[in-house]
Amino acid sequence: MPRQDANRIIPSDIGARLRKIRKERGITLQAVAEETGFSIGKLSNIERGQMPTIQDIETISSCINIKIEQLLLKQSNVEVIERIKADLTLVSIYLSLNLLSTSESLLSKIHNQVESLDLNELLPAVYFSWGEYYLRINDYLKASTYFKKVINSKTNHVEIHKYRLKSLNALSTLEYIEGDVYSALRYVESAERVFQSGDVLIEDQDKINTYFNCIVFNMHIDRLDHALKYCHAIEQFSEGKMYQLSQYIQGIIYYLKRKPTEAIRNITKSMNYFRNENDIENLILSLNALYVIYKSDPMQFQDLIFVIENHVLEELIKKELKKDEQEKVIIFFHMMISMSIRDMKIEFAERLLHHCDGLLISYDVPKLKFRNYHLWAQLYRSIKQLDKELTYLELALSTMEDDSSVEKAMVMAEYGFATNEQGPYRDAVEIFYKSVKAHYDLPHHTLIPAPRF
């Protein structure tokens, strides 16, 4: 039997690739037949292995938006491409697990392989992964460089639109992190135009992320009606978490528009969803929002704080928290403790502080320990136990590494007031203390979620 030429085009390979790509893109044989003028029977025969002419291949390739060279690749190259795509997925998983050195090593290997085989259609995916990697290590300049490489890629490969959209959303996130919301909005509006043209296939999740970022940035510049419009856009094709986040944001918009009843309805509905799904991050976001509404009129909204204190907090206390959830929960508990001390709910505040003590054994973060000790000091000051107040003020000071921090100065002032130390600058210190404390007691969070890509 004669040996098969490794470079020979095998009809069954071409047909199988055509069928695979067509189905991946959700294109029916009927649609291809209408676009190309071929009969369904002819197309079906080609997909089953009948040898097409070059003209037929060009016509079908144009219809399903794929380069003819990709259909004529040797089987070995097709397998290499599939393996590289699988490795890129693995890189994404490593990055999500914060395995940064492993991600960098595999990505370098992939990048070298793609360039050595001249597989230019895969470069946008590789550049995007590099952008994600550098974003993870907080090298925003290099991250931005790689995301811009994706946007400026010349390849006509169908997936370029997906990675161009993701990169525009990533660049909008970078601008947001750097504090330039208007530049962030310009990038995300460019992302929106990518799929509004109607000529490209974009996954729903990427559309949702784009609309979500439009909401976030418009809220930051008080364009509430624009944000509301994008909330309604998300609701058209999302469910679950993203739908509930949209409902939550509408609640915040209602609050800013001075419609507290509608705000509470939306935010409470979302909060209950996040409770059921054990989504701690967004549950805390919802609780913060309800707390802010309560603080705007404690008498009118006292039922809110009852529900939070007697139901939701009890659930949070009993939960086994992941490492990345603990900080958000502790910060929220600290806010509730501070309010409870002011309202003289001493037993409740003491119980929450003991719980935070337990969490901080395994989650040793100096700024949180400082805040916990400081709250213990405030609690003992409120019940006039001077010795214990001084002990916890000293513990708070012992956790502060920055000698010039405002927090440290504030605790030192409190220590001076407690010990009745006199000095020529006492009046000045007292004025300083009151102004700093007003800022310190504000909730240190935002009610607007972070952007995503």
Image (tube, rainbow, N blue to C red):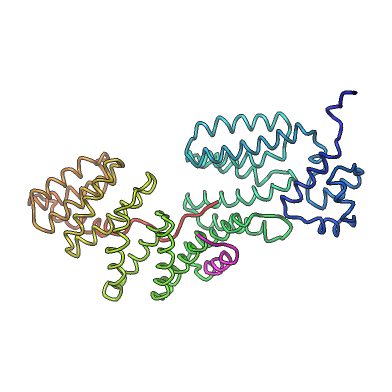
Check if residue 231 falls in the magenta segment.
yes
Residue at (84%, 29%) from the top-left corner?
7
Q: Residue 100: where, in percent of width, then height? A: 49, 35
Name which quarter of the figure residue 317 lies in. Answer: bottom left
Quarter of the image containing the N terminus? top right
Q: Is residue 422 visible?
A: no
Check if residue 399 falls in the magenta segment.
no
Q: Could you tell me what secondary structure mostly forms the magenta stretch?
A: helix
Residue at (72%, 34%) from the top-left corner?
79
Q: Residue furthest front?
A: 1
Q: Is residue 189 above or below residue 55?
A: below
Q: Residue 135: where, in percent of width, then height? A: 51, 42
Q: Residue 232: where, in percent of width, then height? A: 56, 69
**In front of the other: 64 or 278:** 278
Specify whether 12 is left or right of 315.
right
Q: Is residue 162 above or below residue 211?
A: above
In magenta, the rendered stretch is 226-240
Q: Residue 96: where, in percent of width, then height? A: 50, 42
**In front of the other: 49 or 167:** 49
Q: Is residue 365 visible?
A: yes
